[in-house]
Image (tube, rainbow, N blue to C red):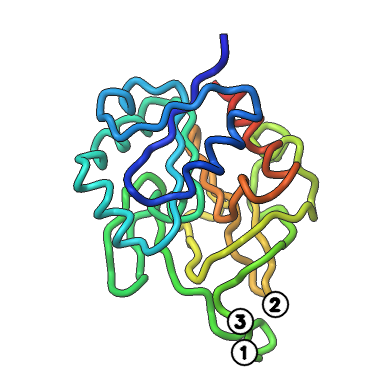
Amino acid sequence: MKPIVTVIDYGIGNLFSVSRAIEHCGAEVHLTDSIEEIANAERLVLPGVGAFEDGMQGLAERKLIEPIREYAESGRPFLGICLGMQMMLDVSEEFGVHKGLGLIPGRVQAIPTTGADGQPHKIPHIGWNGLVEAPQAEEWNRTILRDVKVGDAVYFVHSFTPVPEQAEHRLADCVYDGLALAAVIKAGNLYGCQFHPEKSGDVGLSIFQQFVKAS
């Protein structure tokens, strides 16, 4: 019997590509905005693209905020992707201050407009960038990054970056012009990827594969 991955459909997200990538890893995908299906999910994915406020509004309109919070406390695997990762934190500073899901303590802040050398650089951060171990990260071989090697490149598109309060919640970073940006966050059963695994070739598929195996 195939493992089942429930993907939340709240009107925002790259649902087709995410679903196809997860199916490629041997799972059955259920796209849903049903409170009951989210509550009973084996594994839950929150995708997303676009503005933070719009994403939270989409969840609120469908009355999904509390069900997602309750699921997150269940110990079952959860994965946020791009905007979905950012919404896992407490608050975002994108176009004002907006409350998130509060699953992992922290804020979403604008990527600095200059690199570590003080020179201006392009915003948004777009393209392929390598993953590196965050300073206080746990070993990758016990996480969804088990098959990822330091330096493996994944695909980013973002102007804002999550900043967890606790350094141990940063599993992997990327370095953009000398600035370390959180690329993967983790707290227990909860994972978030700032990049798009579904657009990141074999490396992204390996991450989905490990998530599908998670229990």
Counting from the top left corner in percent of width and height, residue 31 is at: 40, 32
Counting from the top left corner in percent of width and height, residue 157 is at: 57, 64
Residue at the bottom extreme, as displayed: 119
Label 2: few (<14), some (14–19) or many (≥20) C-alpha neighbours in 10 Å = some
Which residue is found at the position 75% from the left and 42% from the top? 202
Kind of residue indicated by mark 3: Lys
Which residue is found at the position 30% from the left and 35% from the top? 33
Image marks 1 and 2: residues in contact by CB distance under 8 Å = no
Residue at disc 3, secondary structure: loop
Kind of residue indicated by mark 2: Asp
Give the residue pinned by disc 2.
Answer: 177
Compared to residue 58, the image places residue 9 above or below, namely above
Compared to residue 36, the image places residue 164 above or below, namely below
Of circles 3 and 1, the one toward us is 3
Kind of residue indicated by mark 1: Pro
Image mark for residue 122? 3
CA gap between label 1 and label 2 equals 10 Å
